[in-house]
Amino acid sequence: MEGSLPLADVPREKRVELTARVRRALAGAYLNVGVMHAQAGRFARAADFLEGAAFVEPDFPKVQYSLAVAYFNAKQFDKATAPLERALAAAPEDADVRRMLALSLLNTDAYARAADLLRGDPRREADPSLQYAYGLALARSERPDEAEAIFARLLAEHGDRADLHVVLGQGHAQQGDFDGAIRSLERAIALDPKVAEAHRTLGNIYFRQGRFPEAVASLRAELAMYPGDFKTVHTLAAVLEMDGKSDEALPLLRWMLRTQPQHADARYLLGKILLAQGAAAEAVQHLEIAARLSPDDASAHYQLGQAYLKTGRPEQAEQQFELFRQIKDKRRGKTP
């Protein structure tokens, strides 16, 4: 263009300024389109554009908050957590951001932090759903006494609710009161036969009691209603393996790992079963991944050592057995 300077002749400071202006303009455009999609209820699509804004200009006003809200409303809680943390760091007194972060953490199994954030929520006392979330976070972060008080109050104020009885049952189970847990869970199922986690929790209790047929029946009942629940699939596979029915466990674990390849416990259990069945070479592949994903899991190192022995690798086997011994000694309080 006539009268324009070649880019190389533009002073460095001017180039930096122009680049910054272009980045801000692009981030603003992405943000505006993302907000439009969010206002129309297309939250996953909104997140796509807001990701672009955050990539171009991470500190652009409102971008982290808007991205977090889009993820949250799209129920992509694992993705919502990081931008919510950044938004809360920028506005630590923002109760809405704190609340969304707490609920995202609750949905990604970070129960203790979720409970801490919900404890001081100004809306919690007047909002039964937040009370429930708070009690759930307490129960699953191994604070059952506090959780039971919350749920007892909710039951008194709002009557019989199946989901409350489920969490009460889980709290009883954490305390070792299996009879109380079973009563609560059976009450939950009586109120709502399809209530989530009731059959799975019963299955876990029966598993711990060595009542394998009842555990299998309960876990299969949960899967009949919620076939994609990985926790239930893994527990069912573990019960079948303990009950001498490893052939039934194998397809469950292989299916699970097709969609959850980084699931360390499923890798370990599959490798253990394959090793017991004589497929040591394939077992090594799974046990190596399990040991890498869970380096403090003594059992994974022990089984991997056994698999190395079976495949003629004694030096690598001894390395794994030494790791196994170190982890065991550390847990017993011994110094290496």
Image: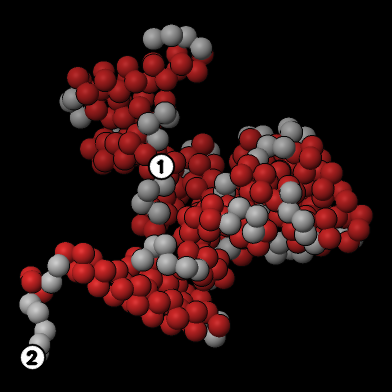
Residue located 34% across and 20% down the image: 323
Q: CA distance from mark 2 to mark 1?
A: 63 Å
- Location of residue 336 with respect to 183 vertically, above or below: above
Element type at mark 2: loop
Q: Tell me the residue that label 2 is attached to.
A: 2
Pick the residue in front: 267 or 70: 70
**Image quadrant occupied by the N terminus:** bottom left
Front one among 284 and 82: 82
Residue depicted at x 79% and y 40%: 146
Give percent across and percent down for residue 275.
Answer: 32, 34
Front residue of this view, candidates 82 and 5: 5
Q: Is residue 291 left or right of residue 235?
A: left
Mark 2 vs mark 1, foreground winner is 2
Q: Which residue is mark 1?
A: 264
Residue drawn at 77 percent across, 59 percent down: 123
Say which amino acid is labelled 1: Ala
